[in-house]
Structure formats: C-alpha cells, structure tokens
Image (spheres, helix red, strand yellow):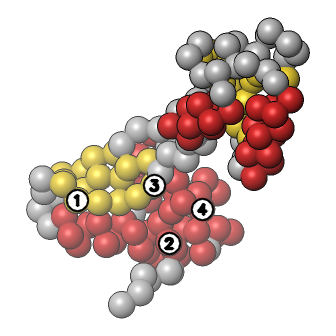
Amino acid sequence: MGYSRSAHAALRFQRLLDDMIEAGGKHEVIWDAPDPDKLSRQLREAMAGAATHVSEMPNPEYANLFKNYKVCIKDGAVIAKPRVSTEIVAVKRKVKKSYEYATTSEQVAETCITEKYVDELLFRSFIRSEKELQKLEKWVSTVEYKLIDHGVGMGVTIVRKL
C-alpha cells in the first residue's frame, strides 16, 4: 500500500511539519502518541503529500522534509530523525620505513612482500652490484613498485604505486 500523496494529508499534520522545520533538520523531533504506528504512517503521508504538492503548501520548506527526515518508532513514540548526509573523506598517510638488514635483491623483495602496509621502503645496506640491481629492477617491473637507486653506498628505495 502506497502513501497518500494528497495536499490534504499534509495540511492535516501541518503542526507536526512545522515542528520538524523548526528543528532545522539537525535535531530529532519526538511525539508521544497513543497509536505510534498510525501517527508515523500519517506523518510519512503528510511529508510525501507536501513534497508532491509544493505549490499548495503554506510553507515551501515542507517539500524538503521527506528527504531531510526519516520517521521511525521507538518506545511508543514517533521520532523524526534527521537524514544527515556527511561526506567522509579518508586520508591515507604515507608510511615510510627503513631496513638495515636487507643486503640482497632477494631480501629486499621478501621484505617488500611481507611489509605490505608500508608505502615506501628504504634499504640503506643494499649491496649495489650490477647483477643485484638488475635482478631487483626485473622483480620491481613485475609488481606494483617503483625502484629509486640512490647510488653506490646509499642504498635503494622501493615505493609502492598507489
């Protein structure tokens, strides 16, 4: 069974709609009712009717109530809860770590695989021979890493591509 979307449904519960507008969409509005199921349904119908018949409403803000509030029942009371739409932005911090024990390309690769939550791995003790560097470059090209060679005696850095 769908909502009654008549303007009359909205006008019958104008006082309750005004309470919701007064709360500004930031606070819950609670009404005690002898039959909370019936009141919650009528309130939802009033909100739907106000959204459908905006031109016939005494207050144009009634049109936004249906998308700004969610009506529910708790402990025998009807509650209009704000539908708070907050944007959550996750900020990922870059994790850097230095390793002194890895001297060969195999040890560097093994460390990169086991330390999967580290974004930048610095290997100061990497023994930089052409053979070891070529093996490391070959391995890095097959996985999602980037190799930074700091020169003889300075080590290498492996950066995870995000």
Q: Earlier in the sequence, mark 2 or mark 3?
A: 2
Whether residue 2 is situated above or below residue 78 in the rendered picture: below
Q: Earlier in the sequence, mark 4 or mark 1?
A: 4
Location of mark 2 (residue): 48
How far is the residue under mark 3 from the one under mark 1? 13 Å
Of circles 4 and 3, the one toward us is 3
Location of mark 4 (residue): 63
Q: Is residue 96 visible?
A: no
The residue lying toward the viewer, choosing from 125 and 55, is 125
Question: Residue, x 69% and y 13% (percent of image)?
Answer: 124
Where, quadrant-wise, is the N terminus in this rendering?
bottom left
Mark 2 residue element: helix
Q: Residues within 10 Å of mark 3 (few under 14, many from 20)?
A: many
Say whether residue 141 is left or right of residue 160: right
Residue 29, image x, y percentages: 34, 45
The reply to whether callout 3 and callout 1 are in contact (CB within 8 Å) is no
- Where, by quadrant of the figure, is residue 77 drawn? bottom left
Location of mark 1 (residue): 73
How far is the residue under mark 2 from the one under mark 3? 11 Å
Location of mark 3 (residue): 69
Residue type at numbered disc 4: Ala
Where, quadrant-wise, is the C terminus in this rendering?
top right
The residue lying toward the viewer, choosing from 110 and 10, is 110
Q: Earlier in the sequence, mark 4 or mark 3?
A: 4
Whether residue 72 is situated above or below residue 12 in the rendered picture: above
Say whether residue 150 is left or right of residue 35: right
How far is the residue under mark 4 from the one under mark 1? 22 Å
